[in-house]
Amino acid sequence: MKLLVSSAVLVAALLASGAVYAGQQTVTLAVENMTCASCPYIVRKAMASVPGVTKVDVSYERKTAVVTFDDAKTTIDAVAHASASAGYPTNPIGQSR
């Protein structure tokens, strides 16, 4: 009986905790409208301002941004919205919006 109760408590705790399934994700985004060397700075700053984003690498040459974020705190849509609000729409590479 004690084992059954312990197992039930463990299962309930896991189901109640959404953080169990959360983790770091990294996505590569195609960035539009980058026309000068200062554009990557603006894109990086906009994306990094989203809570949960831990790393942003922007390439002017490739017109991409590689973003690492905690999916328990934010979504790729929030990161894309921040970039678009700064004037740089983005799309995940390999996906269309």
Image: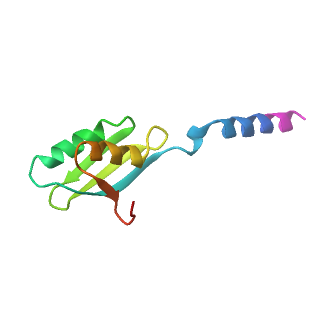
- The residue under the point 46% across, 37% down is 73
Q: Judge from the rendering whether residue 36 lies leftward or rightward of residue 56; answer left or right.
A: left
> Residue 63 location, x and y as percent?
20, 59
> Residue 21 location, x and y as percent?
57, 45
Question: Magenta stretch: residue 2 in it?
Answer: yes
The C terminus - image quarter: bottom left
- The residue under the point 38% across, 63% down is 96
Q: Judge from the rendering whether residue 63 lies leftward or rightward of residue 81; answer left or right.
A: left
Seen from the viewer's position, the closer of residues 87 and 71 is 87
**Dividing the picture into quarters, in which one does residue 2 lie?**
top right
Question: Magenta stretch: residue 85 in it?
Answer: no
Q: Judge from the rendering whether residue 72 lies leftward or rightward of residue 60; answer left or right.
A: right
The N terminus - image quarter: top right
Q: Which residues are magenta?
A: 1-6
> Residue 34 location, x and y as percent?
16, 54
- The residue under the point 9% across, 52% down is 36
- The residue under the point 59% across, 41% down is 20
**Taken as a whole, is the magenta stretch helix, strand or loop?**
helix
> Residue 39 location, x and y as percent?
14, 48
Q: Across the whole image, how many numbered discs are drawn on residues? A: 0
**Dividing the picture into quarters, in which one does residue 30 lie?**
bottom left
Seen from the viewer's position, the closer of residues 39 and 84 is 84
